Image (cartoon, helix red, strand yellow):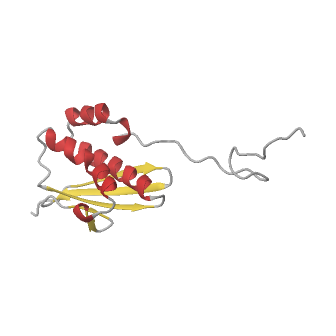
Amino acid sequence: MASKKRIVNAVGKRKTAVARATLKEGSGNVRINKKPLQILEPEVVREKIAEPLFIASQLGIDLASIDIEVNVRGGGFMGQAEATRTAIARGLVAWTENEQLKAAFLRYDRTLLVSDTRRAEPKKFLRKGARARRQKSYR
């Protein structure tokens, strides 16, 4: 009888970016859109995505035995980064089933586990944007 491989799927969203993370047993590789996390540019995005991994390692959770594969689509690079970190954090909580880790994520930043529901307001007709109007002149 073959042992069944454990797989956890998690989703993170931010604005129009959607990230789908797959966690499985492996050798500690983290890939975002098939690129290793270490070569991801710009650096601020790499640091943002690595936050849940850093917090988990501080709590003594062994990340060397988990492979994390993330596919992210839509939005800009920062929205994609925030969606990715949410997906990774949710996946780690589901993988470890550790309440202490969940509490640490919520203490550090609530958006690690709870997707940001804010969206861009649609542009209105006869206007330049959602709220912008032509300036009123009395003379």
Residue 10's spot in the image, x, y percent?
33, 51
Residue 75's spot in the image, x, y percent?
48, 58
Please name the residue shown 26% across and 46% down the image: 51
- Quadrant of the rendered image containing residue 77: bottom left
Q: Which quarter of the rendering shows the N terminus?
A: bottom left
Residue 81's spot in the image, x, y percent?
37, 54
In screen coordinates, is 8 left or right of 129? left
How many marks overall? 0
Q: Which quarter of the rendering shows the C terminus?
A: top right
Please name the residue shown 33% across and 66% down the image: 33
In screen coordinates, is 86 left or right of 23? right
Say whether residue 95 is visible.
no
Most extreme residue toward the front is 139
Q: 47 or 2: nearer the eye?
A: 47
Q: 21 or 119: nearer the eye?
A: 119
Give above or below for 135 relative to 30: above
Please name the residue shown 73% across and 50% down the image: 124
